[in-house]
Amino acid sequence: MTMSSSNCKQRILGAGAALGASLVSMAAAANPVPWQMNLDKGATTITRQIWDLHMAALWVCVALGILVFGAMFIAIIRFRKSKGSVAATWSHNTVMEVGWTIVPVLILVGLATPATILTREMYNATGSEMTVKVTGYQWLWRYDYISYDGKPITKVPTIYSRLAWDSNAARQLGSGIDPNSIVAPDGYHDYLLNVTHPLVIPAGVKVRFLITADDVIHGWWVPDFAAKRDAIPGIMNDAWAKVDKPGIYRGQCYVLCGQDHSAMPVVVKVLPKDQFNAWLAEQQSANTLDKAARTAQAPPSTPPPAKG
Amino acid sequence: MSSTAQAVHYEEHHQGFFERWVMSTNHKDIGTLYLSFSFLMLFVGGSMAMLIRAELFEPGMQLMQPYFFNELTSMHGLVMIFGVIMPSFVGLANWMIPMQIGAPDMALPRLNNLSFWILPFAFVLLLSTFFMPGGAPAAGWTMYPPLVLQGGDAIAFMIFAIHLMGISSILGSINIIATILNLRAPGLDLLKMPMFCWSWLITSFLVIAVMPVLAGAVTMMLFDRFFGTNFFNAAAGGDPVMYQHVFWFFGHPEVYIMILPAFGIISEIVPTFARKPLFGYKAMVYAIACIAFLSFIVWSHHMFTVGLPLGAEVFFMFSTMLIAVPTGVKIFNWVTTMWRGSLSFETPMLWAIGFIVLFSIGGFSGVMMALVPADFQYYGTYFIVAHFHYVLVGGALFSIIGAVYYWLPKWSGHMYSGFWSKLHFWSSVISVNVLFFPQQFLGFAGMPRRIPDYNVAFADWNMVSSIGGFWFGASQLILVGVVIHCVFFSKAKATSRVWEHAYGLEWTLPSPAPHHSFTVPPVIDDSQLAHGDVSH
């Protein structure tokens, strides 16, 4: 695919700006940006704690790397045969060997402790105020609202969330459509990260996702929620998220699920609680009207739909 | 013993091409066959990698349908693991173990022939699936059901090929164990053996323990697909997650099958060019044994997001982190071996140093992904791809290439080009980082693995990675040239010691080594062992 030079320049500038922006304000609803080099801090308390753990582990690795590689490169520079270095003959040192067995254990305990505490927290879905069932299919996601605020939700229609049609047209072999031309209303280049109907959830509410699949194994993941579980036929997994800020959060299926694995994004639209309540009421009434209309049009022989 | 007389008779008996290479029972010839086969497979699997990186060069689909891309990633993994890394380590074991322990040949020479000749047939079966209706298996090298069961009848060929590869590696391992335990020269106690022999002795037990587990997993899959059983079919009461447990109970020891012999190789090369005994020889042996044991109790870290109970997540996090301790000991010991040495930087040493750096980078990312909460953000992304390519390419493959450069003069009797082999190293070590380092960023940004097409935000690092990929692929052609030149055209004769400070029995034989290694058991002189005084 060719790219005009002005377009290319624009993209590089944009990439620089985006990179700068992503470094400065990681907390904003952060979908992947060009040249991104690190995890996002995400949109929940849990994701920020994960980010801290990730950075701690990363810095421990960097420090150990500097230590080990540093020692090795000093050896490479100082103890060269060409500089007349004469080899020592010792081949063990019990104190040092015990030392570099014990010190790594202590470092690992230092990392494992917060990780264990955080894992417990991530596994604690008690007190969730809303439940959504997520089902993976080849190749779309199905969302069923189960309950909200202690009450079952029955009248909200199932959401079928498949790749948006513009991305679908562009992703065909030899389509001739530039993936850069796919742009969301907010300006985000959302090629392969946009859907026909996103999942809609409220901000500031602990939402529990029940995750399963109906054909092969899929994986439901929104990086900014750290809500991630394999969607497995016959098994109901659960994950939860309490998202701070409204916005559009994008993720992808992460378990190979066949030819269109790259084409089943996860898009979640997080609304402020009052807007969400309004949206929910609208869905419920629209669905009631719709059902009533369908019942009226149905042939008389059909039994009336069961009340639920 | 009358073996000397027999050997003389054997040398005089001229073998035809067919008799020498197809009927061979000689450990060196079979070692050469193994190494040549895996060299060929390196370019088969490498070509698939080039196609994968070409499709990923920019967003949008340019070259192939997504399904074919999945066939490529699946077959790339199977070919590289079972066709390149494992057979080349067996080839090195064949060549070196009899020479390092003072034996005339492997203990079971006919079995040796069989275990090699199974392999080409297994790979003909496996690669032929590309030309079958429905195409090659496309569910990844891990072959998770139910997806893999959607494939065409070709999966029967894949399963049979895996059975054959498993039989081949089990036979090879039995032979290595029998050789090491029975054919050591008098006085060569187990704790005086070269590290390469130790690493293979332990690896062989891993192979024998886990290859049958893989065979069991794929056999259940075969029955599900063709004979109406429901081991993995949730709709009939089966459990798709059970496959993952069984597979990774094989799969994690398999990871160490692909890296422990590398540890052995590096422990041979570093002391030679540091002109100093290997630091902490016994600790190195115990570390390998410890890693081998731990490898059996960490498998679920490949499945942290599968929905394990909390207790299992925490247990597998701790056991996985523990592996960093013996692995760290090995790294520290190599660096300390270099400390106060008298270093020179011939080609094998460059590859060994490259190994230490790249393998450590892969090890660091391994520690990060052992942390369960962090792994929830890494799982299934390019961070994982970067991790296992750092340890398998920067680790296993670098050690194999280092081993070839270390022992090739002993095998062929000629020296290779210092310039071209060093160019090969520098070109490979730079390009492998251009190739895999950006994949860590892509993983952090959230790009899933095993996708042929991606959002435009991932475009830039993917392009960098692809450029590194083409560069790394092209660099390996230098190796072909260096090896062909060395074996067939080089005029520079190798001495029997080859490297100034190379110690160990293999260096007491002339270069090229005679057809039968030690027809008379050598006398063991402790001061001539690579790891120095082992009486402590």
Image (cartoon, grey):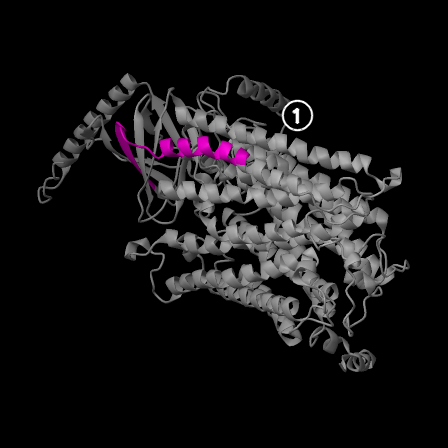
The residue carrying pointer 1 sits among few (fewer than 14), some (14 to 19) or many (20 or more) residues within 10 Å by Cα, namely: few
Residue A70 location (% of width, % of height): 71, 32
The answer to if A124 sits in the magenta stretch is yes
Q: Is residue B160 left or right of residue A92?
A: left
Residue A176 locus on image (x, y percent): 55, 36
- Choose top left, top right, bottom left or bottom right for residue A285: top left
Q: Quadrant of the C terminus of chain A?
A: top left
Residue nearest the viewer, comparing B534 with A297: B534
Quadrant of image for the N terminus of chain A: top right
Who is closer to the viewer here, B370 or A42? B370
Per the image, the residue denoted by label 1 is: A5
Residue A231 screen position, x and y as percent: 36, 43
Q: Relative to residue B191, is residue B278 depicted above or below?
A: above
Q: Is residue A126 left or right of residue A268?
A: left
Residue B242 in sight in this render:
yes
Mark 1, secondary structure of its residue: helix
- Amino acid type, residue under disc 1 in the picture: Ser
For the residue pair B503 and B14, the one nearer the viewer reads as: B503
Please report the residue visible at 62 percent of the width from the left and 39 percent of the height from the top.
A100
Near-viewer residue (B48 or B327): B327
Q: Residue at x 22, y 23 (%)?
A: A281
In this orientation, does residue A260 appear? no
Which region of the structure is painted magenta?
A106-135
Residue A277 lies within the magenta run: no
Residue A294 position within the rendered picture, expressed as x and y whole percent measured from the top left: 17, 35
Q: Is residue B341 above or below residue B460?
A: below
